[in-house]
Image: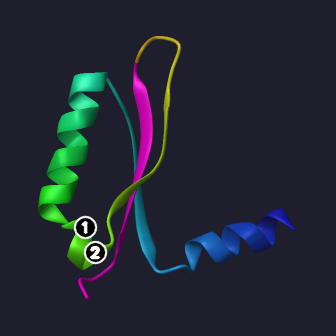
Amino acid sequence: MAERRQRRLRDDGYVRESFTQARGDARKTAQAFFDRFPKQAYMSEVERWRELPDGAIEFTMRRLRTAD
């Protein structure tokens, strides 16, 4: 079942990038991602994020491979 879920995630057409950074750097990275891959063209979004005990932010950005 887990294998099926992983295969489905890989084949959903999205490119994912994960980061772990300090809060300020994470904000800059996300903004640069949206500047490079605009939401309207690439359906870009922060897929998930969480704050780690040390205050760093772990997050995953996703986008379509090509613009619409």
Q: Amino acid at mark 1?
A: Lys
Q: Are marks 1 and 2 in contact (CB under 8 Å)?
A: yes
Describe residue 12's horizontal placement relative to residue 56 as left or right.
right
Considering the numbered disc 2 on the image, is that residue within a helix, a strand or a loop? helix
Describe residue 54's horizontal placement relative to residue 61 as left or right.
right
x 18%, y 47%: residue: 31
Q: Picture coordinates of residue 42 (x, y %)?
A: 28, 75
Q: Which residue is mark 1?
A: 39
The magenta segment is: 56-68
Q: Which residue is mark 2?
A: 42
x 24%, y 35%: residue: 27
x 23%, y 83%: residue: 67
Q: Picture coordinates of residue 37 (x, y %)?
A: 20, 66
> Label 1: how many residues lie within 10 Å, few (<14), some (14-19) or many (20+)?
some
Q: Nearer the viewer, residue 11 or 44?
A: 44
Q: Residue furthest right?
A: 1
**In the rendered image of this protein, does residue 45 appear above or below residue 41?**
above
Q: Residue furthest top?
A: 54
Q: Which mark is residue 60?
A: none
Q: Picture coordinates of residue 5 (x, y %)?
A: 74, 69
Q: Picture coordinates of residue 58 (x, y %)?
A: 45, 34
- Viewport quadrant of the C terminus: bottom left
**In the rendered image of this protein, does residue 31 appear above or below residue 28?**
below
- Examine the residues drawn in magenta and state their main secondary structure: strand
Give the Cα separation between the discs numbered 1 and 2: 5 Å
Q: Amino acid at mark 2?
A: Tyr
x 79%, y 68%: residue: 3
- The number of discs equals 2
> Label 2: how many residues lie within 10 Å, few (<14), some (14-19) or many (20+)?
some
**In the rendered image of this protein, does residue 5 appear above or below residue 41?**
above
66 is within the stretch colored magenta: yes
Q: Residue furthest bottom?
A: 68
